[in-house]
Amino acid sequence: MLDKEAAFPTITVTSNAASLQDHAVQDHVVQDPALAATTQTRKADHIRICLQDNIECREVTTGLERYRFVHNCLPDLNRDEIDLTTQFLGKTLGSPVLISSMTGGTEQAKQINYRLAEVAQQYNLAMGVGSQRVAVEKPELMPTFDVRAIAPEIALFANIGAVQLNYSYGVDECRQLIDGLQANALILHLNPLQECIQPEGDVNFKGLLNKVEELCRQLSIPVIAKEVGNGISGAMAQRLIDAGITAIDVAGAGGTSWAKVESERAENPIQHQLGITFADWGIPTADCLRQVRDIAPTVPLIASGGIRDGLEVAKAIALGADLVGLARPFLQAACDSEAALHERVELLLAELKTVLFCTNAATPNDLRKGERLKQI
Ligand SMILES: Cc1cc2nc3c(=O)[nH]c(=O)nc-3n(C[C@H](O)[C@H](O)[C@H](O)COP(=O)(O)O)c2cc1C
């Protein structure tokens, strides 16, 4: 442990925000060094802001607090035999926990990804990397995302913004990202609000669903549609599934607010206020889960957005999620220390097991059976 800490100390946070304006991007040219520099700067800013500032939603909540488990005073279980093993997209995972997509593209991001991947491998957690757009712009940055050598067995998800399909990215670029990680699935993130508030946002979402459909047709691995904290409704999930999307990550409102994060990066007062106005925009995570499960009872479903402990993981599973993702809590722990990250995972799993035990559920799937979760 000590040796590893020496080689992998507390991760320092940097920012090059001053250079942002110099690289404002209107048009997209793959492998443009200025574009790659802008993307790298944005990634460094996101980590810095997500660690330092209050960027959780102001008033909107996940909605999970509206539910409570019914306590079972006499579980017919041995707690030590509770099995958290989970099947997702053909992989067997150690537990229904996902380290949500966050970062890559800088030296600091590489350290974070490597640390996250170590813990993912140890506990057999699924893991997503952050948007790999920068690795298309600058292929030599792929190693900052590529954690396969560290985590050879985990379910690993590549990531790109769906909107990039309108900005000269196509099947070839997506294959490049997938191959670079030996990924098990590709996450396409949908982030219209974030793009509106980002100084260099890509806001042409016209006709994207057809491009998503074409991409799903051509790729040989599953494609997951994911929001970034504003949620996916049942109706939109249906359209995405009809287009060939294999799984949905609702990434609902109630946790990290990307409107707030981008308002911290604003280059003028209007952009700043825009982010504040929309700080609480979106569909709460619990509402997304219910809506999507109603229209798609069997679609592989990921809950994320504001999940902060194992009790909330359990509630999300009871509401229909197969897998539950956390982003910012893992970022904070990873940047703190390797020990802090291990502690976070241990606590999360202990909390989840405690819910299972005290609701007489032998497996996460059992949480969905009977009347274990009540709306209050
Ligand atoms: C520092 C940071 C960077 C992120 N970058 C990405 C990204 O590149 N792609 C993506 O799909 N989501 C990204 N997200 C969004 C998360 O995956 C997640 O959907 C969102 O933060 C809500 O989860 P949380 O409340 O647990 O943080 C990022 C989150 C954080 C904290």
Image: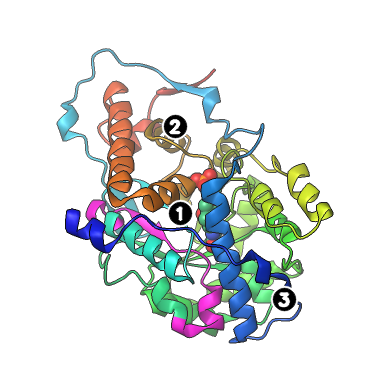
Task: Please give the name of the residue rendered at 27% of the width and 33% of the height, measured from the top-left corner.
Answer: 350
| Residue at 59%, 41% in the rendered image | 54
Residue at position x 56%, y 82% from top? Answer: 137
Of badges 2 and 1, nearer the viewer stands 1
- Disc number for residue 52: none
The residue depicted at 50 percent of the width and 78 percent of the height is: 135
Residue 250 appears in the rendering? no
Quadrant in the rendering for residue 74 = top left
Instruction: Say whether mark 1 is within 8 Å of ligand 1.
Output: yes
In the picture, measured across the screen, residue 245 lies left or right of residue 151, that is right
Residue 240 image position (x, y, % from top left): 61, 59
Mark 3 surroundings within 10 Å by alpha-carbon count, few (fewer than 14), some (14 through 19), many (20 or more): few
Q: Quadrant of residue 317?
A: top left
**Mark 1 = which residue?**
100
Q: Report the mark closest to the observer, 1 or 3.
A: 3
Q: Is mark 2 within 8 Å of ligand 1?
A: no
Tag 1 and tag 3, C-beta contact below 8 Å = no
Q: Amino acid at mark 3?
A: Asp
Q: Which image quadrant is residue 285 in? A: top right
Circle 2: element type: helix
Per the rendered image, the range of residues in magenta is 120-140
Q: CA distance from mark 1 to mark 3?
A: 31 Å
Q: Look at mark 2 in the image and give the residue it sits on.
A: 315
Height in image: 19 above or below 6? below
Lower position in the chain sequence, tag 1 or tag 3: 3
Q: CA distance from mark 2 to mark 1?
A: 18 Å
Query: Along the polypeptide, which appears first: circle 2 or circle 3?
Result: 3
For label 3, the residue is 22
Q: Which of the pair 279/231 is nearer the observer?
A: 279
